[in-house]
Each structure stands twice: as structure tokens, then as C-alpha cells.
Amino acid sequence: MQYMLDTANLTQIAQCIALYPIQGITTNPTILKAEGDISLRERLLSIRKLCGQERSLHVQLLARESDAMLAEAEAVYALLGEQTYVKIPVTEQGLKAIAALKRLGKPVTATAVYYVSQALLAVSAGADYVAPYCNRMENNDIDFRRTIETTRSLIDRDGYTSKIVAASFQNVTQVNDALACGAHAVTVAPALLRAPLASVVVEGAVKAFEDDFSLFHPHGLIEALQ
């Protein structure tokens, strides 16, 4: 499985990369807007620098027509490198653009996925990743768990290399469920990623071990082992 970070905040990216097994960064206009008055070009270049070559970077396109999408994609590749994944919504025009970019061997992430049929069309067009919007699906009475499960089973059955990167989460249960249902990857906001490890019950367990150990050896583990 892969964990990606859904943010454009440089401090959060640097902190999480240092602590967690992060394999990619995903961005979108909403996330970038939350960063305030920034230069889009400079922020994306800074994120690419933090990612290095060992992590993927995913950048949303904005055009609605396929030809304009292709032009935007070329601008993204020119700025951030050919290994950058452009994010394209699975509309009719988006599907056309995905197929065109994959014929050129370009990296693509298919986004705004709500239905199995969307996901499968994107897979058939060659998308490297397909991104179901889990919490948004749930809010619209769409079963994201079944959608991921069905999509994964058909990807595996027919031998496609596309991966499911589940996105749009409200809570940790949704994240875990997406992985359990077959998502290859999840992209998670930093606060949601970090929440379980900062839990009071986890801290309580760690503190109890410290207290118990100090009762019979107050000077620490290394000295006790010598």
C-alpha cells in the first residue's frame, strides 16, 4: 500500500516526509487556495524539491476541453518534470485527454471519480492512478467501499497496471476502509494522517511503559542493558 499526503503546505510536507513512509504528494486548487497569497509556480517547484525523485507529485489540471487539457499538461511537465502526474477529471473530454497523454507515455491520475463506470473507463484509457472521492461519495449516498472493491477486482482480473488512490476523507475509518476494500494507495490530509499516532490512548500506553520501567531501573534502558 502507498500513503500520499494531500497538502500544499511546505512545513507539513517536510515534517511528514521525515516521519512517515510518504510515497507521494497530491495537490488541487482548493488545497493551494488554503495556502493564501502564494506563487503557484514557486510553490509547486518547492513541493517538487521536497518530493525528490523517489516520491510522486500529482497536479490538477483546470481546462474543460481535451486540447486545452493537453496544453496545460505540457506546461506542468515542462515546469516540474516528465515524471509528474497530471490530474484529469473523468469526464468525456477528460477521458479523451487521458488516452492521448498515455499514448505519449505520460503519467496521469484520473480524478473526480464517483462511479465504477468512470473508474473502469479511466483504467481502460490507461490512467496510472484512479482517484475515487470517498467522503464526497458517501455524502451523495454512493458506496465508496463497494466502488473500490469492484474496481480493484476488475483491475486484477484483466491484468491492468492502474492503481486506485483513494481520496477525500473525513475520518480515519474511511481511510482504513478504503485500503481494506482494495485501494492501492490513499492520499490523506496531514492532520488526519497524524491523528492516530497522537491519540491519548497511545500516549497513555507509552507513558505506562516508562513509569513501570523506571520503578526497577531509573537510569534508562541503555544503562540497564550494560
Image (cartoon, helix red, strand yellow):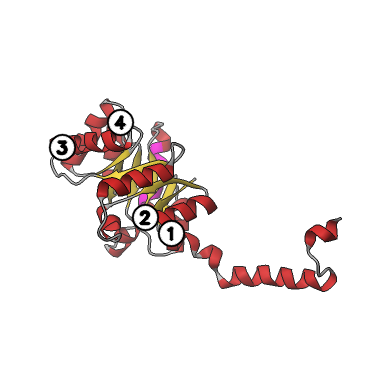
- For the residue pair 94 and 149, the one nearer the viewer reads as 94
Q: Give how far apart the Cα atoms at labels 4 and 3 are.
A: 15 Å
Q: Is residue 67 visible?
A: yes
* Residue 141 in picture, x, y percent from top left: 29, 62
The residue tagged 2 is 7
Q: Is residue 188 placed above or below 48 in the rendered structure? A: below
Q: Alpha-carbon distance for marks 3 and 1?
A: 32 Å
Residue assigned mark 1: 190
Tag 2: amino acid: Thr
Q: Earlier in the sequence, mark 4 or mark 3?
A: 3
Q: Is residue 222 left or right of residue 107?
A: right
Under circle 4, the secondary element is loop
- Three-letter residue code for mark 1: Pro
**Badge 4 is on which residue?**
106
Which residue is at a point 38% across and 33% down the rendered structure image?
Answer: 160
Q: Nearer the viewer, residue 188 or 148?
A: 188
Marks 1 and 2 in Cβ contact (< 8 Å):
yes
Real-space Cα separation, disc 3 to disc 2, in angstroms: 26 Å
